[in-house]
Image (spheres, helix red, strand yellow):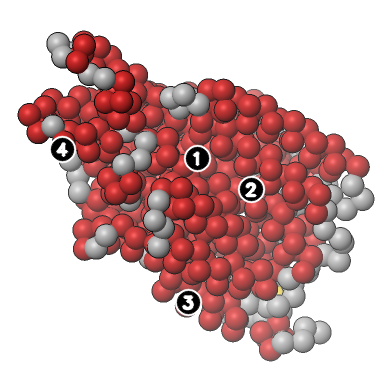
């Protein structure tokens, strides 16, 4: 019998835990805390760039640092939670979030802010994978669990969008450091609810943790994200390429270790199933599309279209509405159509959304902006509900942390990689486009190397430069807007190509609904 009151009163009965509403509220609120933290830096990027006169590459790192911290830690920390206690790990993560957020708000340079945001991500790595693993352990397989996972997916995605809106409101009323304290009130309430209502021990494993595998996974994923963020950035090809090569080597070593370890961190027997790794990859692309398009879109709306931070945050509200509307529909679609068809429906919506974003211009009506975000919310919900149901159904309960950590990798690694990719493409496209405009300018001969670097570094850097030369300010800002527009369109085009590749992989690789159903019955 469990030793604490929460465990004693919250054991699973009839397919769901006792006091299920309170348990679910605690887990959803903890997920909200983690997801808010992943986006607040992105909405504050223009203000941060202005404060530190940072390059576009540095601003990209600020925006993806939390996702980087999450993605490098979720596998290892998910395994530790499986072994030593999911509730304890969840409480540690929620508490550490408050500390890391405070450190972010006190940052005195762009480098310290990046480091603090990585710590925020590590705190999320303690908490976020644990929320889904607890859902998997506490709700029995069936429609009840599927519905809870759909709700969890939608609430997590909505929290990402709500974080942008709240951050925009804060930036209107106060300075950028305050956005990093947004999650603190939610974290306090989540801590209390988890402490009171979530069971202390629910099906945890007694197997030892593969610490070497955990270190290798963290190093490999960190190298991958940083490599993608640098390889396409101006002047980052060599460093980025070296990091990507290192990532491949470390991933190979990780696979070798997992194949030989007695108690692997990541069971390759489970992971090699098509109903595990393909839904994981498909979900990674989908949620990465949401994160990457929001990151590029927020800068586009503020710098090209002239939206305020609050207006840019509110602009994504249609995605919140579509996530709410699509959650029950996606849960029913999974039961009736299976994983493959449901994911393909989601990909169709994602493709429509990205094609809409390719039509964005400086004076585009908001109807086009809002419609793009509305459609992308539907697509992400359909893909993630199907993907996460497949992951949890393919994994034994004793390795629930592996399934939840893989699901979190979709959000964290997918968001980080796509944000790194689209951010790097944006930075490169901006630099190339502004370079062409400088070369075509009648005053090109009089523009020195230092001025050229400042103008090509980022929109914010160009704006700072323009403020020092008011006689050329209008021309510089117009060039910066046009260059950022060019870079954004290239980024959206790359995102469209990635979505098409993901849809093809899902269509070719996943089984039909009937074959999937037979496969599940044989388990």
**Crowd around label 2: few <14 · some 14–19 · many ≥20 (10 Å):** many
Which residue is more in the foreground, 425 or 373? Answer: 425
CB under 8 Å between discs 1 and 3: no
**Residue 471 position in % (x across, y down):** 7, 29
Residue 139 appears in view = no
Numbered disc total: 4
Q: Is residue 85 above or below residue 122?
A: below
- Residue farthest to the left, as pictured: 471
Which residue occupies 52% across, 59% down? 120
Label 1 sits on residue: 288
Q: CA distance from mark 2 to mark 3?
A: 25 Å
- Other residues around mark 3 within 10 Å, as few (<14) / some (14–19) / many (≥20): some
Q: Which is closer to the viewer, label 4 or label 2?
A: 4
Give x and y (percent) for residue 181: 39, 66
Q: Is residue 24 left or right of residue 178?
A: right
Q: Is the C-beta separation of discs 2 and 3 under 8 Å?
A: no
Mark 4 or mark 3: which is in front?
4
Indicate which disc, 1 or 2, sits on the residue closer to the N terminus: 2
Residue labelled with disc 4: 467
Precedes in sequence: disc 4 or disc 2? 2
Picture quadrant of residue 164: bottom left
Q: Earlier in the sequence, mark 4 or mark 3?
A: 3
456 sits left or right of 516 in the view: left
Q: Nearer the viewer, mark 1 or mark 3?
A: 3
Q: Position of residue 426 (x, y in %)?
A: 38, 29
Front one among 160 and 149 = 160
Circle 3 residue = 188
20 sits left or right of 392 in the view: left
Q: Residue at x 30, y 30 (%)?
A: 454
Which residue lies under the disc numbered 2? 72
């Amino acid at each position: 019998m469990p030793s604490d009151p929460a465990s004693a009163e919250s054991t699973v009965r009839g397919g769901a835990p006792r006091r299920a509403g309170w348990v679910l509220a605690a887990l959803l609120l903890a997920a909200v805390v983690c997801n808010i933290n992943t986006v607040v830096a992105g909405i504050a990027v223009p203000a941060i760039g202005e404060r530190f006169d940072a390059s576009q590459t540095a601003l990209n790192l600020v925006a993806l640092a939390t996702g980087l911290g999450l993605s490098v830690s979720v596998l290892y920390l998910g395994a530790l939670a499986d072994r030593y206690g999911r509730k304890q790990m969840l409480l540690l993560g929620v508490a550490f979030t408050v500390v890391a957020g405070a450190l972010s708000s006190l940052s005195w340079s762009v480098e310290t802010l990046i480091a603090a945001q990585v710590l925020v991500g590590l705190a999320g790595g303690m908490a976020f994978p644990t929320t889904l693993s607890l859902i998997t352990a506490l709700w029995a397989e069936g429609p009840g669990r599927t519905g809870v996972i759909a709700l969890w997916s939608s609430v997590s995605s909505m929290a990402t969008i709500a974080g942008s809106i709240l951050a925009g409101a804060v930036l209107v009323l106060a300075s950028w450091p305050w956005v990093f304290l947004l999650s603190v009130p939610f974290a306090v309430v989540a801590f209390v609810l988890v402490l009171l209502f979530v069971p202390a021990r629910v099906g945890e494993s007694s197997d030892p943790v593969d610490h070497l595998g955990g270190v290798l996974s963290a190093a490999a994923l960190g190298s991958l994200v940083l490599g993608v963020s640098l390889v396409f950035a101006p002047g980052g090809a060599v460093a980025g390429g070296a990091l990507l090569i290192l990532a491949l080597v470390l991933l190979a070593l990780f696979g070798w270790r997992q194949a030989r370890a007695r108690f692997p961190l990541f069971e390759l027997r489970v992971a090699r199933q098509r109903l595990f790794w393909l839904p994981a990859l498909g979900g990674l692309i989908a949620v990465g599309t949401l994160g990457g398009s929001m990151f590029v879109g927020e800068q586009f709306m503020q710098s090209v279209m002239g939206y305020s931070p609050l207006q840019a945050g509110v602009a994504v509200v249609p995605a919140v509405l579509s996530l709410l509307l699509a959650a029950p529909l996606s849960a029913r679609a999974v039961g009736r159509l299976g994983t493959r068809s449901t994911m393909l429906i989601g990909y169709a919506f994602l493709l429509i959304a990205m094609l809409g974003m390719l039509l964005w211009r400086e004076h585009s009506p908001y109807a086009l902006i809002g419609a793009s975000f509305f459609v992308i919310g539907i697509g992400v919900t359909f893909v993630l509900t199907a993907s996460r149901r497949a992951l949890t159904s393919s994994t034994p309960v004793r390795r629930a942390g592996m399934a939840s950590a893989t699901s979190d990798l979709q959000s964290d690694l997918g968001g980080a990689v796509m944000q790194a990719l689209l951010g790097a493409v944006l930075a490169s496209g901006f630099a190339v486009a502004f370079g062409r405009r400088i070369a075509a300018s009648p005053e090109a001969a009089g523009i020195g190397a230092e001025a050229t670097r400042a103008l090509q570094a980022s929109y914010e850097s160009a704006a700072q430069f323009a403020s020092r030369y008011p006689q050329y300010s209008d021309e510089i800002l117009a060039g910066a807007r046009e260059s950022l527009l060019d870079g954004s369109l290239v980024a959206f085009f790359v995102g469209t190509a990635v979505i098409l590749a993901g849809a093809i992989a899902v269509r070719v690789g996943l089984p039909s609904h009937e074959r999937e159903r037979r496969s599940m019955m044989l388990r």
